[in-house]
Image (spheres, coloured by chain):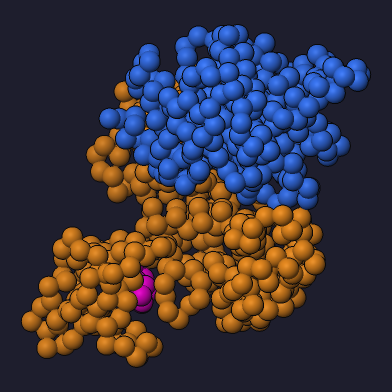
Chain colours: A blue, B orange
Amino acid sequence: MPDSLFRRREECHYPQSLYSLAVDLFAVVQHWQPTVHGAERGRLFEAILVRYGKARELPMSEKAGSRTIRGVRSASGFMHENDAVFAFPDFTVHCELKHLTTELSKNELLIFNQKAVDYLMAEGRTLRNLPFYRIILSGGLVSPAARRFAAQWGILIIEPDRLPFLILHDLCGRFLPGVGNVSLETQDDLWGELPQLVTPLQDRLARICRLVKQGGECVMGEYRVNWAIDHAQRVIGDDLWSAMDEHNPRWLEDRFDRVSEACGLERAVYS
Amino acid sequence: MDDQKITVSTETDSVPRVSARDLFMVLQIFDRRAETTLEEVRLRICVNREKQRRGTFLWSAARDTSGELVKLGLIKGSPYARNAKQYETMKSNKLVLTDDGKELIAKFKEDKKPAYDEMFRLLVMTHPYVREFIRALNRTDLIAPVITSMKDHVATRYANNSALTADLSAGKFETKSLCALLTGRLKRELKPAEDKEIETEIREMVSEAKRSAVVDDGVKVAKLILNRLNDIIIPAIFRSDGLGFDARSHRALWSIGEDFRTWGSLRSHPEYDGWLIYRTAVVELSGNGTELARLEFDHGMKQTGENFLSKLFAAYQKLQALKGNTFVPSWELRAVFCYDNRCQMSVFDKLFDQDYSGSDEFRLHMEIQRQKLQHESPVRAGNRNIGTVRVVRR
C-alpha cells in the first residue's frame, strides 16, 4: 500500500482521505467479482459503495437515486440522479458508478460532467466554496476518448488494470524501493503534473473563464493529455505498480481483503 | 548464545514463504494430470481459500508455491513472475510433474507423515538458509526481539506518538534507549557490529521518515517505524548466525518449523520478552552440512501425552512462582509447558482439550477468556476459550 512507505515529498496536493478512497475503490474494481448480471450488477455495485461508506464511517451525504449534492438541488431544476456523494468537511466527492459490459458512452460522460456544473451554479455556498472532486468508478475498461475527456475536466477515472492518477501521484511522493526504470526526476515531474489532471471542478471552470477572457494556452493540450494517459499512466504507472508488487506482492489484495471484510463483500457476492 | 566461533555462510538463498499445506495442495493438482498451468494453480489456491476474485488475485501465492515446487525438483516449469503484469504474460506457462513429484504424491496418498518428512528433507537440501537456521537452532534456542510497542520496546516517552513525530521531524531517535532495552530483552550485551549496524540503519530510517513525521498522523508513522525497526533489528541480531535476512523471511522460517513440527515459536513466555524459537525435534545435518542426516520427533503427542497433567502441574508451579497468582493466564501456561517439554503448541492444545477435566491426582480450575487475544490463538477446553487456569494436586 502506498501509505506503508515513507514520504519523499512534504507538500500535500490532495486530502489524505481522497488518496485512501482512491486506493480502496481501485482495489474493488480490480478484484471484486460480481456474480449477478445486467442491471442487478450495477445496483449491487452501488450498494457496495454505500456499505463501504458506512464501514469506513465516511460522510456519505447522498446515495444512489438521490437528486441533490450536499443537500443542494440543481440550478436548472432538472432532477439529476446521483450515485454517491461524500460530503467531507473540507471537500466534496461526487461519484458515478458504472459496471457495464460495453464501453462508457460519450453521453453518459457529458451528462455526468454537466450535472456537476448545474449543481455548482445553484444556491449552495458550501458546495461552491469547497473543492468539488469527481470520480468515475468503472468495473470495466474505459475508452481512450473517455480518459481524455476526464483528464480535460479534472475527473478521476478508476478502472481495472490502470493505476489511477491519484495513486500514481501518491507513489511519486514516496520512497518506493526498486523503481529503477523511473528516475527521481520523472517522479518529481509527475508529482507536479498530476494535480493538473485531477482537479476540483471550480479550478477547471476558473481556468476556462481565464482562457475565454484573456486567451492563452488551452486548458489541457492534446499532447499533455495523451502523454499523461499513454505514458505516465500506462508506462510509468506500470513500472510503479511492478515496484509495489516486488515490495509487497499482496499490497492491493490485502487492501481488497480489508475493504471486503469491512463491507461484507463476500456476503454481497454469495448471497 | 555460546561463544563458539560461528562460520557465516556466504551462499545466498531465498527463504521459502509458503506453507507445507499449500505445497501439498498444489502438488495434488498434478495427481489427475501430470501437466497444468500457473493460472490453474492460482485458481486452485483461490478456491482453496474460498476467495472468488477477478484479475490476478493471489498471483504471488501461485508463483511462490509453484516456484518452490520447481526448486524442490517436484515439478518443472518457469513460474517466476516478478510482478502481476509479468504474471499475466506467464500465466499459461506449463508446469509438469517430475518423477520425484510423482513419487511424493504416491507417498502422500499412502501416509502423510513420511511425505511431510520427505518434503522437509528436500527443503533442507535445497535451501542453505534453512540449513543455517537448523545449525543456529542446534547451537541454542533463539530469542527474536520483535518490536511490537514503541513504549515498551523503544522508549517510554514514545508512548505518546507526538513525541515520536517531534523527534523524527527534528532528525532524532531514541536509539540508545532502544539498544539498552534490546540488551535486557536478549539477556546479553549487543556486539559492536550489531550496535553499529542498528545505529547506521536507524539513521537512514530517520532521514527517510522526516517528511512523513511532518505530514502524516502519529499512529500511521508509529506503525511504519515499528515495521521498519523489525527489518533493522532482526537481521542485525541474527547476522552473525548467518541469518541476516529480513524480518518477514524470519517469520516464514519460524512457521515452516511449525508446519513440519521441527521447531516451534512462542510469543508469550513470561521469562522472555520477544519470540522464543526452540527445537521440537531432533534435526541433524550430514557431515558436509548439505543434507538432512537425522529427523526424529521425540516430543510428539505420544511422548508429551505421558503424564500430561503432572507436566502441566510442573509448568503451572513454575509460572505461579514467577507471577505470584493462583490463576495464571492460559496462553502463558501453554508457552511455559511447550518450552519446558519442547513440544508444539498444537500438541499442547490437543492434550489440554483431552485432559482438562483432570484426574484422580490433579484438578483444573478454569475461567472463561474475557478478552480476545490479539497475537495468540486461544487455549480451548470443550469448545470454550480459556482465559486463566489453576492446577491443584488433590
Where residue B206 sits: x, y (%)?
76, 62
Residue at image position (64%, 32%) is A133
Tell me, yes or no, if residue B337 can be seen here.
no
The region drawn magenta spans: B332-343
Question: Which image quadrant: the C terminus of chain B?
Answer: bottom left
Above or below residue B269? Residue B256 is above
The secondary structure that most of the magenta stretch takes on is helix
Left or right? Give the position of B85 relative to A200: left
Can residue B341 be found in the magenta stretch? Answer: yes
User: At 67% from the left edge and 55% from the top edge, which residue is drawn?
Assistant: B216
The correct choice, above or below, for B363 with respect to A25 in the image is below
At 44% across and 55% down in the image, what residue appears? B255
Question: Residue placed at 45% from the left, 31% from the top?
Answer: A63
The verdict on residue B191 being magenta is no
x, y percent for residue B313 = 24, 82
Res. A252 image quadrant = top right
